Amino acid sequence: MIAKKSTLSNEDITIVPTGCCHDCGGRCVLKAHVKDGKILRLETDNGEQPQIRACLRGRAYRQRLYSQDRLKYPLRRVGERGEGKFERVSWDEALDEVASKMTKIKEAYGNSTIFLAAGSGNQGMLHGAPPVGAMLLAFGGFTRIWGVASYEAPLFASMATYGTIKTGNSREDLLNSRLVIIWGWNPANTIWDPETSFTLAKVREKGIKIVVLDSRYTDTAAAFAHQWIPIRPGTDAAMLIAMAYVIITEDMVDRAFIEKYTVGFEKYRDYILGHEDGEPKTPKWAEEITTVPAETIINLAREYALSKPAALIAGWGPARAARGEQYSRAANVLTAITGNIGIDGGYASGFMRAYSSRETASGTHGSGNPVEKGAPPRKNSLYKLRGGTNPNSARIHSAKVYDAILRGRAGGYPTDLKMAYVVASNHLNQHPNARRGVEAFKALEFVVVHEQFMTPTAKFGDIVLPVNTFMERNDIAPPWLGSPYYIYLNKAVDSLFESKSDLDIVRALSKKLGLPPGLGAMKEDDILRIIAGRRDDISDYEQMKRDGVVKIKLPEPVVSFKEQVENPDSNPFPTLSGKIEIHCEHLAEMDNPLLPPIPKYLTHSESYDSPLAAKYPLQLLTTHYKTRAHSTWHNVPWLQEIEPHSVWINPVDAEKRGIENGVRVYVFNDRGKIRIPAKVTERIMPGVVNVSQGAWYDPDEQGVDIGGCANVLTDDAHSPSGTHHMNSALVQVEPAEEVAP
Amino acid sequence: MTQMGFYFDQTRCTGCYTCAVACKDWHDLDAGTVNWMRVNAIEKGRFPDLFVAYLALPCCHCTNPPCAAVCPVEAISKRASDGIVVVDRDKCPGNMDCRSACFKACPWDVPQFDPGKNVKMQKCDLCLERLKKGRQTICVEACPMYALDVGPLSELRAKYGDCVEAEGFRYSERFKPSVIFKLKKE
């Protein structure tokens, strides 16, 4: 254990540098004060600047670690699946059963029927899903998902437009901007790399104007915005396109940039001016769709085009919606036609992983997975490009896993799934249409779950294996998206109860499966040394371990596409044309009206103006919550008391329905019904309600979810890029009958 | 005598509550009981013209602490060396005896009690033990926005000015709370 004696106390306390590494949008430093094998309290980074200070979630870690609800022993289901009845079994019994079921399923149906439900609950480089994936590969392969619920549209649009996900600039470069437009992005709650909010404060203090577009008056808007523009969900592309109309018709485009670095501007201009469909995309046209006054659209367009360099940060939230790829593409194209790319203070929007040695988020081209071998590229994939999402057609879209389980090959899926191996994932809670998920999980032959708590997903396990936390094992945390640092999570205390690390579980199970030990034969520290050695920006492993953090000094801010813009002849953009693709030929070849080669405003079956809106007139947002990282931290009392889970509703909509602040209401549509308290607030626009995702699904006897899981209401659908429709459900809200005392 | 004070830059606060959680962890306070550091949201206006601010407030360690003045057993005292207002929980008889006199006297609801019968008062002691070791308070070191500071009031004034106004806070000339703010204006 790496530790030093505390100077804060005369007691025999040692301080262990470790960290917190869930999927909140940060990876942060924690210093555990340990006495007699127990963590008494935590501090955060108080070393050299920039400090990587943990947020409220990390500071509450002791209440995860020492929760009474920690899973203590391996469990075997005794009731119906999902009923939550288990008996304690030994590790040996539990793993024997897992090994025997896995072997039977492999022999009877083949490896493709094994589904790896690998979530983002653990973001360390060693533990969590990676060792399980490696074991399943050695076992002969498995089926995995494509389509990450967080970001598939920005990823796709980034690849289609720029040919890479390494876009945006490192955070401190925002201080070089003359205008910062924050679109559907709420780092005050979602962190988005730990230095982001503080940088935005410095931007504001420097006098740089900040404009926030969001359907809610978020904490980000409240803290940083000089101007807040509320916009109707699902219509962001229309406003961006109308901004392009203003910039084009008022001749504010950067012609030289367009000519030198882009392809297809004329085709976009034709669409904008209405030459293609007879509908000029004027600010007035957009006003009717977005509710944003035409004058506001005109002014913002002028400001953006004339305040060069300006940063347009197109967040992932509005893209997590039906046709979200059109929003992301429209934003990317706007940054191009104004020439705000490759320059200090500008910002090529896109995926926004400016600093990173990683070029992809969910696997690269080619895979060692025998199940995927030889499968052709998936339809509607950008398979000709390197990077981005793996286009292998043997993968199942994550919103369609339930449908695939229930319908299988007969339903057009590549396999008939028979078992789920769940690790670091509250899958049922965090994927759309939770009630269909319940049906699907019940239909499987076998479910094994690695977990720390009895989550809604763990309840559906046949065998549930207790996993330890960051504080009980060693790991390395890379930055969340792309800040220049790594955190070494030193083990601070021994594993509680009978819990084990994911790696140790895999080691024991591999033996029972008769698999070669592979990495499993090595010491944890030696594996971490190898992992660190693969990163060219970690120079001193021992020092990183000792300090608990390595901060990489950038000589200057990272500005994506600087090389391409400064020296285009020797640095083409990594697209097929070598230029920024306003019109993307790869998309044109797909010949899919829902994936046009230029960005367009497209509607869908749950748009605000769809026929379904007559029955369900409110648009539902399922944003990230201040006190959770997805569904992690939901059960932590220190966080629960801060801002209790609720549905946000505007007073106009509340009054119509006889709803008062704090009373319980039903939020429902054809997919399901939840019951939660209402937060009646001016901070959300009329016609829109918000149920933050991550609260745990907890159905009562009537099937009403009294836990308030947003995914009871979301649709298990995806747009062609793979983006989920998380912010595209229509709902109704009604006061809930009072429950008898 | 040095008077220690508390600085809060309200314009920077995003309402993240990290200070409050770090405080509960450091001082080992359960959920649902007391908060030595409180964060309150202030929401004003009508859609779409809104104003939202947060106020983070520990104990104000007043020059003339009203809590100490009303305590029947002198369990609350102001330290001569640094002006920090502390409670001697061994002396505090519990809130049934005095009917929460200190709580009632404080305009900012700082003195707090666990739920339960005849419980003793507790509140922020400005991380006295940390200050003694030359360290900063846990909330100051926690804030991801660097919006908090603790130090001698004279030094805070020299650094940040002498504004004692904040959204959601009413200054008292009588008690002279040891606070400095950067006010978030509507």
Image (spheres, coloured by chain):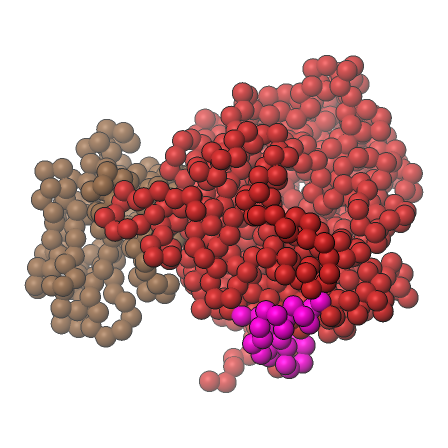
Chain colours: A red, B brown
Highlighted magenta segment, given as a residue range: A73-99
Left or right: where does residue A479 sit relative to residue B158? Answer: right
Residue A46 visible here: yes
Query: Residue A420 magenta-drawn?
Result: no
Position of residue A48 measured from the top left corner of the image (x, y, whole percent): 40, 31
Residue A559 in the image: above or below residue B68: above
Q: Could you say which is closer to the camera, residue A717 or residue A578?
A: A578
Query: Residue A76 magenta-drawn?
Result: yes
Q: Could you say which is closer to the camera, residue A106 or residue A659?
A: A106
Please report the residue visible at 55 percent of the width from the left and 60 percent of the height from the top.
A500
Left or right: where does residue A75 sit relative to residue B158? Answer: right
**Picture quadrant where residue A530 is located:** top right
Tag count in the figure?
0
Left or right: where does residue A105 sit relative to residue A187? Answer: right
Residue A609 in the image: above or below residue B156: below
Residue A659 visible here: no
Residue A394 in the image: above or below residue A386: below
Position of residue A401 measured from the top left corner of the image (x, y, whole percent): 77, 61
Please report the residue visible at 64 percent of the width from the left and 52 percent of the height from the top.
A520
Position of residue A453 measured from the top left corner of the image (x, y, whole percent): 54, 66
